[in-house]
Image (tube, helix red, strand yellow):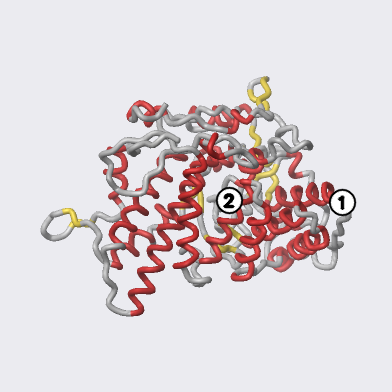
Amino acid sequence: MKKYSISILLPLLVLMGCEGFLDERPSKKIIVPSTLDDLRSILDNTSDFNRGINFGIILSDDMVSTDQGVLGFGNDWEREAYKWSNDLNDANGNMSAWNFPYLTIFRCNLILEIGKKLSPDNVRQIQELNEIIGSAHFHRAKSYYYLLEFYSLPLRNVDLQNIEGVPVKTDTDVNVLAGRSVASEVFDLIFEDLEKAVSLLPDWNNNPIRPSKASTYGLLSKINLVLGHYEEALENAEMALSLKSDLMDYDEIASQTVLPLPFNRFPFASLNKEIIYFEEMGTNSFVTSPLSFVSPDLISSYAENDLRKDLYFSKSSTSENYLFQGHYTGNFQPFSGIAVDEIMLIRSECLARLNRLDEAAHALNTLLEKRYRKNTFQSLAFDNANLALQEILRHRRKSLVRRGFCRWSDLKRFLGETWWNGPLGRTFEGNEFSPGTDPGAYQLILPIAEVQANPFID
């Protein structure tokens, strides 16, 4: 197995990695963070740590547009993404799906290095330092997982030692260079980080902006699902739900909401009670365009009394298409964090894959009872594992529209399933585009600027 020294975006990390914590003092000198308060201030900068990757929206099959809409996107890489190209470099050879996670990793490494040097004076400070260190491990693991979802081949049921990963950085020394680690090495670090996070974070702190044991178990369940480790994903999901399992009643929300949903009306409150960990994505033109519609095949899949359709979508004023407005952020920015409904769906899917069909049905019914108009939902029962799985996955798609890169992740992990033929294609200027079932179509090429700056990357 190859060993490398490491460097990632040297000048960018030095400059941008420090922006969140450098503080100009009266002496005019740059001060490096050195106290618990300094480290907490870094972590509580939500624009740095609670920011997801929005590539998954345009790379999913839940979104369609018109030729006019695609031509109106603000960047060439957005148009390429709409065609499912795996080269999403911007005009400068960079990608936000690469830069943002590595900036977060740099900040986490800084926090961990400084945290080891601090000597708490009392029990409160010990607890605070533990939470800070645990949070840094959580965010670093999350960032590496995000990178693997976009820059590695599909990860389910494969030998991870034979899959390209990403460069691994565990310190703040930007003067050493590195190539790509294999995926198994990256996952070793991810699981090590999350194990440490579980041991240090509070069960649930009533503040979904900050990580907790509940969010860590939730992230573990998502990762193990992607890897095809269904028993582990189930165990993680159940641990998360034992700590946080509140569900909103969509019928109650609908009774307080103007329906049909007007344009730019967002029915869900920010930091609502289903949120285990809050994260929102930045918005590019493909997110905010009035011509970015929901796929018609998805719209047609909702039953008459299914309030997900009423609370997620508004009808376009210029066509028969629908716009998505059901963000769990309470505004126009898509939610990319971890919520109870997703973890319940993971639990149900894993139970079905493990042939525990009655439990799988009960888990799904518990969620769906809160998604339909009162007294209209008829409980589901399963007697066939394959049919149960298909039903659960249909509801997963209907529930997790524009949730981070959930659908992109599903498109990748379904490869190899006998029933999966790839997503429906999208048409642009008379040509149809689809990633099909070729695993290579689900792995982005690395940013050109990074490859040019780092001789250790092939």
Q: Which residue is depicted at the point 67% across and 67% down?
A: 247
**Where in the figure is residue 120, as x and y percent of width and height?**
29, 73
Near mark 1 (Cα within 10 A), the count class, few <14, some 14-19 or many ≥20, is few
Helix, strand or loop for disc 2:
helix
- In the image, 84: left or right of 283? right
Q: Quadrant of the N terminus?
A: top left
- In the image, 327: left or right of 380? left
**Which image quadrant for residue 129?**
bottom left
**Which image quadrant for residue 364?**
bottom right
Q: Is residue 293 visible?
A: no
Q: Mark 2 points at which residue?
A: 223
Looking at the picture, tell me which residue is in the foreground, 1 or 340.
Answer: 1
- In the image, 304: left or right of 346? right
**Where in the figure is residue 31, as x and y percent of width and height?**
19, 57
Q: Residue 384 carries which label?
A: 1
Residue type at numbered disc 1: Asn
Q: In which quarter of the image is the C terminus?
A: top left
**Where in the figure is residue 288, as x and y percent of width and height?**
55, 43
**Where in the figure is residue 121, as x and y percent of width and height?**
27, 77
Q: How many marks?
A: 2
